[in-house]
Amino acid sequence: MVMLGMIGLLAGLALLIWLALRDVNIIFAAVLCALVVIVTNGLPFAESLMQTFTIGELGAFTFAGRFFLLFAAGAVFGKIMGDSHAATSIAMALVRRLGAHRALWITVLACALLTYGGVVVFVVIFAMYPLGLRLLKEADIPKRLFCGALALGAGTFTLTALPGTPSIHNVIPTLKLGTDLFAGPLLGLFGGALMLAMGMAYLERERVKAQAAGEGFEPGPRDIIPDFATIEQDVPHWALAILPLALVIATILAPRLADMAGAGEGSAIIAFANSQPVLWPSIALILASLVAIALFPAVRRAPLQTMGLGTQDAIMPLMATAAVIGFGGVVAQTQGFAAFTDLVVGSALPPELSMFAAASTVSGITGSSSGGLQIFMATLADPYLAQGVSPEELHRLVAMASGGFDSLPHCGAVIAMLTITQLTHKQAYKEVGVVTVIVPVVATLATIVLAMLT
């Protein structure tokens, strides 16, 4: 029975990856694979499907309920920044400053600014794509490198490493550990800088190699390339465009600064902010959305409809992530997962390295950094805290570790990005894999070494 359970567990994981790679709806795939694991491991059928998968500690609806407001607030903010052309304005300011020939730098920096300011990854990709096509044509750079730049700027250091980001990856550890969004700031800054430096060095090296080989820009069959005059129509000034992003970060940062200055003592608002790691960044995003509506005429005409569409945009990413976590919740009930937990936690490796291995493996299995992080925090955080790892260090290192092997080919975000850019895994996954798997893994290991030495 134990052997059958292990085979079923591996079969469920393999099936999830196979279905994701074939663009099968991830919610359906997660339910189907959970059924495979339940049946082959002899888990209580009704309880596992109706309790563990849905409303257990790692249940899909438990996760969705806990993080709905943050997903919705991020999607609304992203919708407003996109429809108001504020995101385009920031990118165009970088074009004027750096020149169109630095298309990869512009893409990475613009995506990083937007995601660090709270705009969700999918919105960033949609907002950047038309401008990116124009830049690629001007600089004659292959689209596969644009994919790598999108992935580096929108899906690496701003999501898991940089302190203060309102991303779900930075929020999940706070609920378990009692930390805030600025946990492990020096480790995060070091790891984030390393990811950016290594990722850009790789992309620039590949750009030079492509140029030497005579490889240039080739548009996809459905690509419409606008000219810069068209892109700049109805675009707000970049200084106004960046204000909502700055407001998000300032609002999130305010409680920590008040505490450091001693001004937060006895303040009900500061106490509330520090006790609400999900609600407070959501409030920051909502506040910034209202300010953006007031600033930008393009969204002022029908603000409620824009916010409604933004909320709708949050549903599918939220439910897709939740379904994968529900699958992970079922996996966590199996003897195979218990054996894996005992093996990793009881290994002779230093705790920082073994927790890196654990978080990386779980994120790789689920193809989701937020899913892997949620499962790790629910099932593995306590043993590492008991071994003396500080909550702030655990927060930052595990968040960074979750952002490596999550981007294997079955990752939903990777599949969505390739679909939007009209490229295949064969054409572009090499660049995406280097900047979202190899670079974050190396940077996280270097950050772990720094943490062990300090």
Image (tube, rainbow, N blue to C red):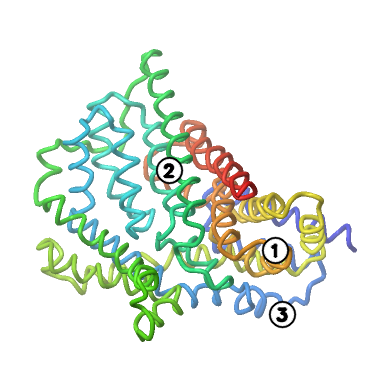
Is residue 445 found left or right of 146 in the rendered image? right
Q: Position of residue 304 (x, y in %)?
A: 20, 74
Left or right: 117 as drawn, with respect to 180 = left
Mark 3 vs mark 1: which is more N-terminal?
Answer: 3
Q: In front: 409, or 178? A: 178
Query: How far is the residue under mark 2 from the one under mark 1?
Result: 34 Å
> Which is more foreground, mark 2 or mark 3?
2
Mark 1, residues whose alpha carbon is within 10 Å: few (<14), some, or many (≥20)?
few
Quickly name the residue at label 3: 46
Labelled disc at residue 267: none
Q: Say if 97 sits above or below 70 in the image.
A: above
- Say which residue label 2 marks: 151
Q: Are marks 2 and 1 in contact (CB under 8 Å)?
A: no
Left or right: residue 430 versus residue 421 is right
Image height of 108 relative to 240, above or below:
above
Which of discs 3 and 1 lies nearer the camera? The answer is 1
- The residue positioned 38% from the left and 19% from the top of the image is 208
Q: Label 2: state its secondary structure.
A: helix
**Quadrant hosting residue 260:** bottom left
Which is more toward the observer, 393 or 131? Answer: 393
